[in-house]
Image (cartoon, coloured by chain):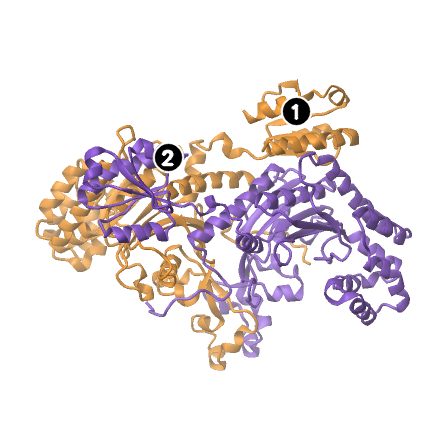
Chain colours: A purple, B orange
Amino acid sequence: MSNIKPSLAKGTRDFSPQEMVKRNYIFDTIKTVFKKYGYAEIQTPAMENLATLTGKYGDEGDKLIFKILNSGDFLSKVKPEQMAQANSNAITSSISEKALRYDLTVPFARYVVMHQNDIALPFKRFQVQPVWRADRPQKGRYREFYQCDVDVVGSDSLLNEAEFVLIYQEALSNLGLKDFTIKINNRKILSGIAEVVGKPELIVDMTVAIDKLDKIGLEGVIKELLERGFTEADIEQLKPVILLEGSNTEKLNSLRAVLSASATGLKGIEEIEQVFEYLAGMLMPEAPKPDLELDITLARGLNYYTGCIFEVKTNEVAMGSIGGGGRYDDLTGMFGLKGLTGAGISFGADRIYDVLQELNLFPESAAAGTKVLISNFDQDAERYALPILQQLRNASIATELYPSSAKLKKQMSYADDKGIPFVILIGSDEMQTGLLTLKDMQSGKQQKLTTIAIIDLLKR
Amino acid sequence: MSNIKPSLAKGTRDFSPQEMVKRNYIFDTIKTVFKKYGYAEIQTPAMENLATLTGKYGDEGDKLIFKILNSGDFLSKVKPEQMAQANSNAITSSISEKALRYDLTVPFARYVVMHQNDIALPFKRFQVQPVWRADRPQKGRYREFYQCDVDVVGSDSLLNEAEFVLIYQEALSNLGLKDFTIKINNRKILSGIAEVVGKPELIVDMTVAIDKLDKIGLEGVIKELLERGFTEADIEQLKPVILLEGSNTEKLNSLRAVLSASATGLKGIEEIEQVFEYLAGMLMPEAPKPDLELDITLARGLNYYTGCIFEVKTNEVAMGSIGGGGRYDDLTGMFGLKGLTGAGISFGADRIYDVLQELNLFPESAAAGTKVLISNFDQDAERYALPILQQLRNASIATELYPSSAKLKKQMSYADDKGIPFVILIGSDEMQTGLLTLKDMQSGKQQKLTTIAIIDLLKR
């Protein structure tokens, strides 16, 4: 037994009761919306076979996967010459067969392939579980964090994309956010642009550069495009795209002109229009219209997405994106099941937490643990309190009896520290009359009431 | 990208939508009771520093801890002579600094010590999270499984123990179990018996042997006691204890006679009596009396518990214990914070799942995902359906529109596979009259109704 002062593993966090109530409030609100749209929850194990994960996240990603050491005599599978070379990379696969989940998408793909005979397509699932990344921890970046994903696989209908917009709209509104922007783009539009310029192989370079418009301005973007292999003539062609402005309809019209020679590009425009059309058909007259903005610079996960791309930002607080996603045409191909298209979005729960905290949007109820504490004066009062304690609980009121006859001041400060809003005081007077003293901890107001009356009051 | 057929890591499980709904039903039911008794949720990270975990579970336990390989060039900290020896044990601490949580108790102790200045004592917390053990997987034993723990630290009141009995009673009853036994014992009684026999050092041997009475009978127990160092004379003294029978009160009276010379033993009896007294005071007249049985052979986690010990078994299905716990007088001592007493119990969620499954106790509602599917005949019907889809969702009815105009048979079998109880059929007739066809998938019955009437019916 060591007596070393214990600490958390780097980049990980404990969640206190107060934090848990708020986190659960966020997850529950989002999950309720997922379910309303027909999505069902699954869970996958924290540990996956290493072979399931490696090669899915690029070389940089592979390095960030937490590997689990084989149990027992793990060195027994390492050959003596490998031992002599002491090469960590070469040795890893001999001493580690399992790793921690890096995201929820690859395990979902594995799930779909493994259970393909049991699931009805389209398969609509959500998943809210932690993932682990051996990233360098910094403010807002952790080595363990929750992802909150919703995906559909086996349906190419753009209704799914339209519903993702509504899911964002409804979930974020239900969380109290009032001003946020859902950005939409389409990979096919980006491909079309690169095609029209005659540099389809430079699509990634092009989007990386255009994506920086907000940060480095037009001059900066042009400089970067030149460095990345575009000519002055290319840039002339790209300018209307880089500087695209106006309403979504105006943007689409400009793009249609630029992309008239690209079948792929026009398909991208058509997809976006179809999403808008679905949304127009689904929005109730009284519902707030989502702030949906076509943003041609949006290019997250470009190697991955093949159709629509989404990203959400709040306009009330300076904060990176609080959600994103898109369509990927070959989710399960990595596990040998071809031709299954998928689409999905995710919510950034940690960032949403920070936003709600900053805007003071957590409801009162998201702080509610124990509702009432019964004080404990002495053994007689304790005995008197026991049936009352259970009467309150039977009325579904979270109740505690202070477990010893400590000083009243200590009992009161216990209620204070735990944020318990009411205390019932029971002394000899109360035991004689049956009228208990109920103290409102916030106002300090006290009143004498029967148990029944207290239950009525607390249930209101 | 490998095309290898993907598989699960040994001893781990996926949870399907149907399983998740049932698992959530169990966890939610139990958590609701925890909260009613004033317990608040915390979460700790999956990864702990290896030093936090090692030495806490005995040598056997240490071997079952999953260690995480350091990131990057993990061999750089291994000395050449260590490499040459190729000793897995000696090398582990050089290549692994972190490990996966083995239970929820040690992380809880770490939490209490690290946050001692922020928490109000007594600190009542519950925690429902997965743990990982490198055990040999077998039926009912997994390498990843959820623990569901509730503990109080910083209160020696036996009210806590009494409330644990009520928590078991209420949670298991709410889950629909009708016949279960909560067994109670006290470590001090076991100590007292070993003391009276004059073999206090053999307390573990004694309880291990007595614990087998059900399996190997009196003769077997006597044989084992002899093998473990007890004399014939000792066994004569132990016989009334081994063969203890009657009501709890009768048992306590017999024990009081046997233990009259042991202050510790008498203290144990007193503690049990105090728990019974609390329970008598708290039970409502109409509440079912918990089947609480003093069982002197109950000795789980003996090295650990110092006071009351609990274990719960269902009598409706052959199954090991579905819960257990007890008091441990020095929870946080392992991290240098002395003198904090704790007590806690846990629920075996996997076993409870199997019990409910076998007894068919999962409620209908624990299968409910999407409530109604709207069929998709063609583009016109799809467009007509869009506002109806949102109208139903606005009424909090989980609704899906089939995302393409596939064959009706396919759409119906989608509803069937997903267990969706209602389908709305919209054809040209429905669009003309505004009366939609609602089909009850179980009875096959169809009726024509307005959207409003359908909402009324489904909300009922």
Residue type at mark 2 is Leu
Q: Which residue is label 1 attached to?
A: B451
Protein chain holding label 1: B
Q: Is residue A450 left or right of residue B237?
A: right
Q: Position of residue B157 (x, y in %)?
A: 24, 49
State the quadrant of the N terminus of chain B. Answer: bottom right
Residue in front for this viewpoint, A196 or A256: A256
Residue at the (68%, 33%) spot, across then down:
B401
State the quadrant of the C terminus of chain B. Answer: top right
Q: Is residue B91 left or right of residue B188?
A: right
Q: Which residue is label 2 attached to?
A: A457
Q: Is residue B321 visible?
A: no
Q: Position of residue A261 (x, y in %)?
A: 91, 52
Q: Nearer the viewer, mark 1 or mark 2?
A: 2
Residue at the (67%, 44%) spot, across then down:
A164
Q: What crowding class fits label 2: few (fewer than 14 Cα within 10 Å), some (14-19), or many (20 or more)?
A: few
